[in-house]
């Protein structure tokens, strides 16, 4: 199937540069060893998320591409899990902030991918992939617009969760309005120009949004040293949070920089 699409016809297996069973063996070894490494050096939460992503992508998403347009929603879940892994690596858990980041990545993928898919719709049709852009162009544009709009309240959610200062709502709002405007144009008239504009704005939106998130982040570190000031403090505040094993080993190695104590 990949041989029928310009975007994928140069992949090693398609070009017969690698035998299918060699590719499968490499993927299996990489997947199992990667999950084991995450469990041993980071924490079980990150390892479980990594394993779930492998199963979702290889076992569900790839299969549904030729069965139903639902594959796009499954693929969006796959793309939303990595920021949760990063959060869990820093904190050891999945607090509301992790789910917020996952929600942003999930929603962002629809205007990003649907704009790209519009330009590749002929290839998807030839290869027999079930995509909204093939079966229902109007739905493809509507979904892109809906999720572009969803990104706006998600940005406000970062303020509501006290992850960032209120200024983030204003600065990220500019990005959201520009993104929504491009999605609206794509909804009204889906063509090469509007698809290209929406796609490139999606490439700008996500890194810019993340940069603003870091710029406006709040610091919640309130730890004290009882021995220095002699005051009585709550032990829960006096002791720093338990770091994942990844950062413990990183400190021992001594050449990978300072540990990340907080997700934000």
Image (spheres, grey):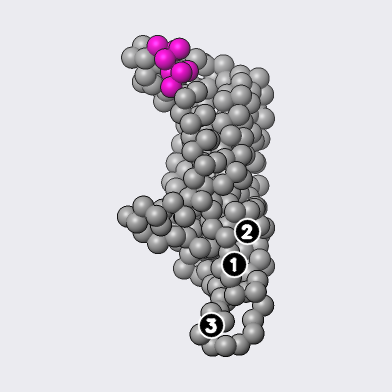
* Closer to viewer: mark 2 or mark 3: 3
Residue 234 left/right relative to 6:
right
Indicate which disc residue 227 carries.
3
Q: Main secondary structure of the magenta part?
A: helix
- As measured in the structure, the alpha-carbon distance from the residue carrying label 2 to the one carrying label 1 is 7 Å
The residue tagged with tag 2: helix, strand or loop?
helix
The correct choice, above or below, for 207 with respect to 130 in the image is below
* Label 3 vs 1, first from the N-terminus: 1
Residue 169 drawn at (x, y percent)? 58, 68
How many residues crowd around disc 1 within 10 Å: few (fewer than 14), some, or many (20 or more)?
many
Occupied quadrant, residue 129:
top right
Q: Which residue is found at the position 61% from the left and 21% from the top?
A: 63
Do labels 2 and 1 touch, CB within 8 Å? yes
Q: Which residue is mark 2?
A: 97
* Closer to viewer: mark 3 or mark 1: 3
Occupied quadrant, residue 59:
top right
Q: Which residue is mark 1?
A: 163
* Label 2 vs 3, first from the N-terminus: 2
Residue 135 drawn at (x, y percent)? 63, 25
The residue tagged with tag 3: helix, strand or loop?
helix
The correct choice, above or below, for 73 with respect to 231 in the image is above
Do labels 2 and 3 touch, CB within 8 Å? no
Residue 173 drawn at (x, y percent)? 56, 64
How many residues crowd around disc 3 within 10 Å: few (fewer than 14), some, or many (20 or more)?
few
In magenta, the rendered stretch is 19-26
């Amino acid at each position: 199937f990949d041989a029928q699409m310009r975007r994928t016809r140069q992949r090693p297996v398609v070009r017969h540069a690698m035998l299918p069973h060699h590719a499968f063996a490499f993927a299996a070894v990489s997947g199992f060893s990667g999950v084991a490494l995450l469990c041993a050096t980071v924490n079980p939460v990150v390892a479980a998320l990594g394993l779930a992503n492998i199963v979702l992508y290889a076992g569900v998403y790839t299969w549904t591409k030729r069965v139903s347009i639902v594959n796009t929603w499954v693929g969006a879940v796959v793309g939303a899990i990595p920021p949760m892994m990063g959060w869990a690596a820093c904190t050891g858990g999945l607090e509301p902030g992790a789910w917020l980041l996952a929600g942003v990545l999930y929603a962002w993928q629809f205007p990003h991918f649907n704009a790209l898919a519009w330009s590749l719709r002929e290839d998807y049709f030839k290869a027999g992939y079930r995509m909204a852009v093939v079966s229902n162009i109007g739905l493809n544009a509507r979904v892109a617009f809906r999720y572009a709009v969803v990104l706006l309240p998600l940005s406000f959610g970062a303020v509501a969760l006290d992850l960032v200062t209120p200024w983030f709502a204003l600065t990220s709002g500019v990005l959201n309005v520009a993104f929504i405007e491009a999605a609206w144009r794509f909804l009204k008239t889906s063509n090469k120009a509007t698809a290209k504009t929406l796609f490139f704005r999606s490439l700008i939106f996500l890194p810019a949004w993340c940069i603003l998130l870091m710029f406006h982040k709040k610091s919640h570190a309130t730890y004290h040293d009882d021995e220095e000031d002699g005051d009585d403090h709550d032990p829960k505040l006096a002791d720093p949070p338990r770091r994942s094993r990844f950062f413990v080993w990183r400190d021992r190695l001594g050449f990978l920089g300072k540990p990340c104590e907080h997700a934000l």
